[in-house]
Amino acid sequence: MVFTSSKELADSLLEGDLNKCWAIIKEYDYKGYSSTFIYDELITTALREIGYMWQRNEISVAEEHLATGVCEVLLSDINGKKKKWETYKQERLCCSVLRPNIILLA
């Protein structure tokens, strides 16, 4: 399910409107949302929706490439300008083999 801001971001990416994309991202930053939320729930969801639109032939390959290119610039801007954001948290998986065919995941 795509929430309103992800859809708005997807539309802005497809329009090639970097300023509007950046405004959406900054709005969430100012509201106190984490960079994890912004990356995972906003940007990733928008890109996933663009991919689904392409699969359904609702947009052309050129439009998808434009959106991807704008997103690359946006991500570069975020990484360059948003030093104050907390380090992007990555979950880790620890595996331990207790016996053959028994694996403990923590």
Image (cartoon, rainbow, N blue to C red):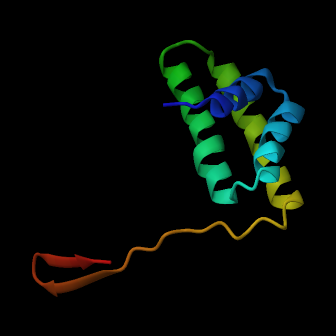
Work out which quarter of the rendered image holds the C terminus and state it. bottom left
Compared across the picture, whether 68 is left or right of 106 comes to right
Residue at the outermost left position: 100
Compared across the picture, whether 75 is left or right of 1 comes to right
Q: Is residue 73 above or below residue 48?
A: below
> Looking at this view, is 71 or 10 the one in front?
10
Residue at the outermost top position: 58
Compared across the picture, whether 102 is left or right of 89 comes to left
Measuring from the top left, give residue 36's x and y in whole percent: 63, 58
Q: Is residue 10 above or below residue 94?
A: above
Question: Which of the 4 image quadrants contains residue 48?
Answer: top right
> Looking at this view, is 15 or 40 the one in front?
40
Measuring from the top left, give residue 44's x and y in whole percent: 59, 43
> Looking at this view, is 78 or 57 the one in front?
78
Q: How many marks?
A: 0
Question: Which of the 4 image quadrants contains residue 90?
Answer: bottom right
Residue at the outermost front position: 31
Measuring from the top left, give residue 8's x and y in whole percent: 70, 27
What residue sits 23% from the left and 79% below the top?
104
What residue sits 65% from the left and 42% below the top?
43
Question: Which of the 4 image quadrants contains residue 18?
Answer: top right
> Looking at this view, is 92 or 25 the one in front?
25
What residue sits 73% from the left and 69% below the top?
86
Measuring from the top left, give residue 13's x and y in whole percent: 74, 29
